Amino acid sequence: MKILYKPLQYIYCVYTSLVFILLMFLSVPFVFLASPFGIKGGNFIYKVCSIWAHIWYFLIGIRHQEIYEAPHDRNKQYIFVANHISYMDIPPIVATFKQSIRVLGKYEIIKIPVFGWIYKATVILVDRRNADRRSRSVRALKAAIKQGISIFIFPEGTFNETGKPLKEFFDGAFRIAIETKTPIKPLLFVDTLERLHYNSFFSLNPGKCRVVFLEEVPVDQYTMKDIQHLKQEVYSIMEAGLKRYRSFELPILQD
């Protein structure tokens, strides 16, 4: 079976790439037309990306599923946080949300031809190696909140390669939550590592891709002195949630 599996895996991964690129180029005119129109244009671009993600999922055999452990008010503003372990964490973001949102994304990805341009039009960029860019990204996130838009942050910053449910969180999301009095809504990306391991693009495979909405965490009672306490509270909620849905033995890549 291994002799057959590997060639089929490579063919599947090439197929998924070609479909992704085709859908990307079909999306470009809509992104281009919407880009000059500020908030409304940005919201429209997210809708385009959501359609792109759903069609791509369907054509490559990935089953998107949303699980709500607590009621979710799409008319309410949140700071969304989620675990980060795979490049397949990106499609569920645009596939899931039905409300105005802006995502904090890595600066390096804008270097990817065409996709980088779309990415730049949809995210608030952060470069943690550059203090000025970090400050600008924080100001942009706060500005989005002032305009009534929810924001999305991976508090781990980079892929969690520890084999544990989560790696240590950065302070940023929790600092902004307290400063703006915006509740935190934790999410879990349960299956993305099984869909695509961070070590190899050719590990991509079809299957389920669950997004779990956990109970929101109000921040009204917190002050800036309580950042570490809030961070630990959210960390504990997400860690317990991940343990309910999956084990933490990392998938073994096929030779």
Image (cartoon, grey):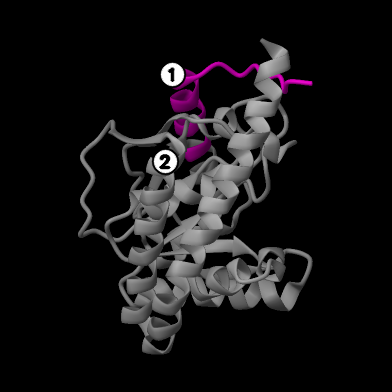
Which image quarter: residue 129? bottom right
| Quarter of the rendering occupied by the N terminus | top right
Horizontal side of residue 94 vs 10, given as left or right: left
- Residue 8 shows in this picture: yes
The residue sitting at 69% across, 36% down in the picture is 202
Does residue 27 appear left or right of residue 110 in this picture?
Answer: left
Q: Residues within 10 Å of mark 2 (few under 14, many from 20)?
A: many
Disc 2 + disc 1, Cβ < 8 Å: no
Q: The C terminus lies in which quarter of the figure?
A: top right
- Image spot of residue 196 (x, y percent): 61, 35
Q: In terms of depth relative to the viewer, which is nearer, 251 or 14?
A: 14
Q: Within the magenta stretch, is there residue 50?
A: no
Cα distance in 3D space between marks 2 and 1:
13 Å
Q: Categorize mark 1 by other alpha carbons within 10 Å: few (<14), some (14-19), many (20+).
A: few
* Farthest-out residue, bottom: 36
Q: Position of residue 146 (x, y in %)?
A: 36, 76
Q: Earlier in the sequence, mark 2 or mark 1?
A: 2
Q: Is residue 150 visible?
A: no
Total count of labels: 2
Residue marked by disc 1? 244
**Residue 146 to residue 99: above or below:** below
Report the residue marked by disc 2. 187
SS of the residue under disc 1: helix
Give the amino acid at mark 2: Leu
At 38% across and 82% down in the image, what residue appears?
Answer: 34
139 on left or right of 7 = left
Percent across and percent down for residue 169 are 62, 44
Residue 29 vs residue 242, the one in the foreground: 29
The amino acid beneath tag 1 is Arg
Q: Which residues are magenta?
A: 234-255
